[in-house]
Image: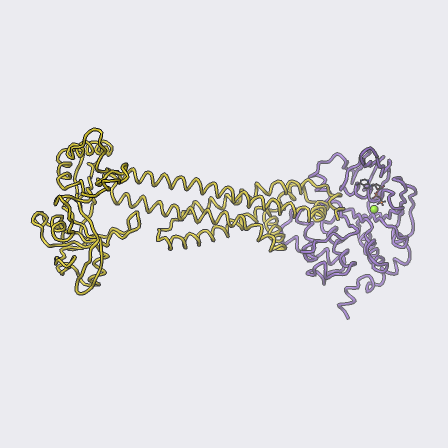
Chain colours: A yellow, B purple
Amino acid sequence: MTFSDAVISALDALRLHKLRSSLTILGIIIGVAAVIAMVAVGSGGREQVVAQFRSLGTNLLVVMPGSITKSGIGLGSGSASSLTDEDAAAAVREVTLLQVAAPFVRENAQLIAAGVNWSSLVYGVDLGLFEARDWDVESGRLFAPDEIARGAQVALIGQSVARALYGGLDPVGQELRVRNVPFRVIGVMARKGQSAWGHDQDDVVLLPLNTARQRVIGRNAANSRSVDSIYLKVREGESLAAAESDVKMLLRQRHRLQPMQDDDFTVRNLADIAATQEESVGTLALLLAIVAGVSLAVGGIGIMNIMLVSVTERTREIGLRLAIGARPRDILKQFLFEAIALSLIGGAIGILTGILAACAIASLAQWPLLIEPEWIVLAVLFSGFVGVFFGWFPALRASRLDPIEALRYA
Amino acid sequence: MSLIETEQLTRVYRLGDEAVHALREVTLSVAAGEFTAIMGPSGSGKSTFMNVIGCLDRPTSGSYRLGGEEVSAMSRDALAAVRNRKIGFVFQQFNLLERLDALGNVELATIYAGEDRRRRRDKAAAALTRVGLAERLHHQPTQLSGGQQQRVAIARALVNAPRLLLADEPTGALDSRTSLELMALFQKLNDEGTTVVVVTHEPEVARFTSRLVRFRDGRVQSDRPQRPDDAAAELLASQVEIMPDFAETAA
Ligand SMILES: Nc1ncnc2c1ncn2[C@@H]1O[C@H](COP(=O)(O)OP(=O)(O)O)[C@@H](O)[C@H]1O
Ligand SMILES: [Mg+2]
């Protein structure tokens, strides 16, 4: 019995019981589909997260006011902001591991240009931001140092704002009113895309820090120099942890904190955040592997069950085949091929279903879709293996039948 | 030369403490080219004997040589090869696979002979033609009469050109007229050179053969040559009656 004989005979036998075969492979289909879909979506999501942290810069520290260990009782985290642009200046000056500091303020504000209304996140920044975040204009120019210093009424806008307010027009040189304060647009920033938390990083307006603080983001803060956060970029090749502890020491000193007092600020390290994210994706992958294993095992047991039924039903056929010259191994091959065909068909349908499901989820979640050819190969191999593993026992049983007894079977 | 040679062939079934002696030291030879009938009461060991000489079963003791070769010591695979090439077996229940047509059923036996697909089809079609079913190649078993189904089974037994054709009550499920037509077919195959052994309990069926062996209690009770009946010769002479297929298609 050649390979192709065995394949043809297996498909013939399965065609005879279409409904039964379909129900049997349902387990395999669901198992493989779930795995493919979840792996594709999971990896797409992970790719996204990792890419975003990388784009943000893994050598970046973020300093925020308030302590995360103190759950905001009394002091209310971030209230009466404890951070100032002087802290930022001191940090670059005194912590040699730092390359640049970028203090900023941030608030949502109403925009108007040429009669169009729009609401965006408005940042007050200094020149450090562009270096810290590796961000440049796509057209126009960045702020000049004296514009920052004297609080000029100039603005840089993100691409989403440019599109919303000016349509196809070149925004550079146009007027933009931010909370009714007139600004002149001097540049459009390069595209950043979505952030790790899903918001549009191009829906922003950047103003000189002092201008923003004095004229737009009318904070009733006691300290006119306070900022919302500071980005600190650590020099290439230097230790983030070392920079972090130096910064903490400096800020505690500047804020005159007693040894028993908690920090009134928080330093976060994007590399750590990225690592925890990747770790949780790793846990998810393990969970997926368990789900995959269980569903494929259940599918496999279904195949074993149906193959045992099939062997019993076809006892006479087996006897006849033995009587006309089939060797035990021919019978083994025949039933093993049926089991493998079942699981491979299930696997193939499962892969297709999984890809479709992944596409649907990815488009709903607006995640990139990542389907590696290796997974397909792996899924095919694995479902083949399930067929061999669970088909072996029924096939062996068939091949060991005695021809006479099999022929006499009613 | 003897094609089948058994010596002291014994087959004992063990049912718990009880031993059933189905065959008791049967010594029998069948020469190549003979047409033999085996008769005997139910339970006398006919089927057991056929199964052993058909290599479907092994004797408990004694020896069986097929074409001079000792069979009882062969491996399962070697026995499968003997069943495939040297012996054709026909059963009372035709044992056709419902999902295959006549050609497919006959072809089944050639699959295990390792022939390529084209040759297999040709051989299967030739075997069906030989039993008078040239016009029924693509009929499913359910679309064929009992006699036609048994012819398909005979074609399947013949397709690998075995020297020996064994039939255990091949007419047991057929009406008497169809039985006689089938015996005429066996006689024709025997005339063409195949050694045929047929088990039957119908005297008129046994009358077609040239030798009659009677079994009783697992032993050979009698063994004598006979002259095939004229009725058989008459049936043979009229092609139309032997091959009802042709009659139908001609009409
Ligand atoms: N598988 C078996 N197990 C036990 N006894 C059997 C088996 N097959 C046949 N026999 C017994 O062996 C004897 C011969 O049976 P068998 O060869 O079938 O007789 P026949 O074909 O002449 O009717 C009977 O007594 C029968 O009951
Ligand atoms: Mg019998």
* Position in image of residue A220 (x %, y %): 15, 48
Q: Picture coordinates of residue B185 (x, y %)?
A: 81, 56
User: What is the total number of numbered labels drawn onto the structure image?
Assistant: 0
Residue at the extreme bottom:
B251
Q: Is residue A195 left or right of residue B187?
A: left
Residue found at the very far front of the displayed protein: A74
Q: Is residue A93 above or below residue A155?
A: above
Q: Does residue A389 show up?
A: yes
Q: Is A276 in front, or is A354?
A: A276
Task: Report x, y in % for residue A203.
Answer: 23, 54
Task: Give coordinates of residue A66: x percent, y percent.
Answer: 23, 39
Residue B131 vs residue A84, the one in the foreground = A84
- A231 or A214, which is in the foreground? A214
Which image quadrant for residue B135?
bottom right
At horizontal 79% and vertical 64% (from top left) the residue drawn is B244
Residue at (78, 50) in percent of width and height: B91
Judge left or right: residue A333 versus residue B239: left
Picture quadrant of residue A258: top left
Q: Nearer the viewer, residue A16 or B157?
A: A16
Q: Is residue B1 visible?
A: no
Give the residue displayed 85% in from the left and 34% down from the top: B8
Point out the quarter of the image occupied by ligand 1.
top right
